[in-house]
Image: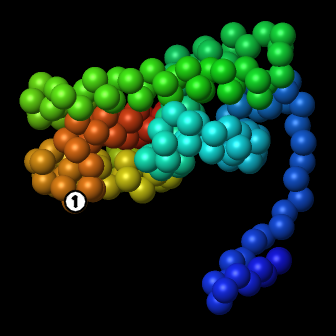
Amino acid sequence: MVIIVFNTIVKILVVKRTVEFTDEEVVRGILNNDPIIIEYFFIEKCSNMFVYILNSVFSGRIDKTELVNELFLFLAYDNWRKLKDFNYNSSLMTWITVVATRFFIRKRDKLIENESSEALIIENDKNIFTNISEDSVNLPMAIDAMPNERYKRTIQLLDLQEVSYEDAAAELSVTVANLYNIHRRAIAQLRCILLV
């Protein structure tokens, strides 16, 4: 363990052994739901890419953890179809950087478009959650297992406590339109957890 002191602020950095995987091992590990490779790729290997996207696409106004979750869900959709289409004509990092940048630019543009249409949000979107709860006995455990605290809190507020979108948005310090999008992502993450 390495301790670094800067102007009376103590930061503890855990130095861990880094293992490099080949592109083929990473793709195979992700497709086989290997938690070590998934964490290695999305948290460690793609870290600089997420910082780049965070600063260049979103001007630092969004949480890096949400970017990681968004990209994971985007790639995991339809049984990892996009990742299965990777043909090794370039490095995996080059490919994922292009895919992620395009995805987040489209996502940003959609968010900008949706900012002006908050009145179009249908507040009774609870049927998505109802379908999940009918299919799962382990719903409370699945919610507790959600890695993104904002997504977890969103589901607790909107679906379990049935707080209005306006009140939930105020508590989470986001606009109603952004909360609607966060809620959809939270439901998608919950579905992924329930499918494991």
> Could you tell me which residue is drawn at 31 percent across and 34 percent down?
181
> Could you tell me which residue is drawn at 70 percent across and 82 percent down?
6
Q: Dot 1, crowdedness within 10 Å: few (<14), some or many (≥20)?
A: few
**Which element is circle 1 on?**
helix
Identify whether 92 is placed above or below 153.
Answer: above
Residue in the foreground of this view, choosing between 161 and 87: 87
Q: Using residue 61 as the reference point, say whether residue 9 is left or right of it.
A: right
Residue 80 image-quadrant placement: top right
Residue 55 image-quadrant placement: top right
The amino acid type of the residue labelled 1 equals Glu
Q: In the rendering, at what x and y percent does residue 47 appear?
A: 69, 45
Q: In the rendering, at what x and y percent does residue 162 appear?
A: 13, 49
Residue 175 appears anywhere in the view:
yes
Q: In the rendering, at what x and y percent does residue 159 appear?
A: 21, 46
Q: Residue furthest bottom?
A: 8
Residue 179 image-quadrant placement: top left
Identify whether 172 is placed above or below 12.
Answer: above
Q: Using residue 99 as the reference point, say whether residue 12 is left or right of it.
A: right
Provide the residue designation for mark 1.
Answer: 171
> Could you tell me which residue is drawn at 71 percent across and 31 percent down?
30
Q: In the rendering, at what x and y percent does residue 60 appear?
A: 49, 47
